[in-house]
Amino acid sequence: QVQLVQSGSELKKPGASVKVSCKASGYGFNSFGMNWVRQAPGQGLEWMGWINTNTGNPTYAQGFTGRFVFSLDTSVSTAYVQISSLKAEDTAIYYCARARWLGNLNYFDYWGQGTLVTVSS
Amino acid sequence: QLVLTQSPSASASLGASVKLTCALSSGHSSDAIAWHQQQPERGPRYLMKVNSDGSHSKGDGIPDRFSGSSSGAERYLTISSLQSEDEADYYCQAWDTGIGVFGGGTKLTVL
């Protein structure tokens, strides 16, 4: 069965970096892209962008350029998001979600369990 | 630019039915959307995709109590025979020229 398993919670100081992983299993990793979604405390879901697992080409949403980098290690079917120069407002749960395409719709048909990143001094 | 509008809250009694709405902004009345459920303290789960003609396809293991429909620029999620575990946040999601979009979510309370 399809599974997306994310790395564990992180506690970081402002200015540090963090790398969250999302390991996929149960399907051909290169056959589906990977989305990243952020959920700040008590807030809704916010799309951060996605990465094409065939080409490695990332697309970033507005507000997630510069400090956010999506990457892949296809040898272990894993996607990553690295966040640098962390700020308190980066405190959130970060989710990966598989990208399933139907026509013009990219919809998220499987989700990781989420990774809590806390930024605090 | 696509905007998805959802009511912030809804409530219905145990065993009853409820219909949640996702309204697509002007110019997007033919777009398909997806519905996702987020139970308290849990990650989101994909429920279904709903097309503009009302056809829908559900994710793995989604009960028959969940169904989707459409009318014009609105997409609906109907939950029948409400159970306590249906108390959750429900988000609609769509795609607009390479950009993912979420609605603000509807918090469903089961009375």
Image: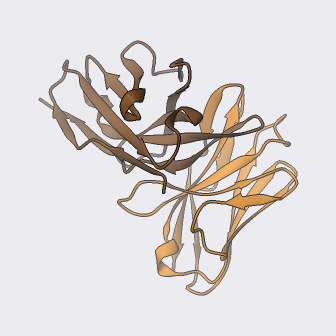
Chain colours: A brown, B orange
Q: Is residue A31 above or below residue B55?
A: above
Location of residue A116 by image quarter: top left
Image point (47%, 75%), residue name = B85
Give residue A103's position: percent from left, percent from top: 78, 37
Q: Extreme top residue here? A: A66
Q: Is residue B70 above or below residue B87?
A: above
Give residue B86's position: percent from left, percent from top: 52, 73
Image point (52%, 27%), residue name = A53
Give residue A61's position: percent from left, percent from top: 53, 23
- In the visual, does A113 lie left or right of A1? left
Image point (20%, 18%), residue name = A15
Q: Extreme left residue here? A: A121
Q: Extreme bottom residue here? A: B15
For the N terminus of chain B, the image quarter is top right
Q: Say which of B2 and B48 sits in front.
A: B48
- How many numbered marks does the figure carry? 0
- In the visual, does B59 lie left or right of A1? right
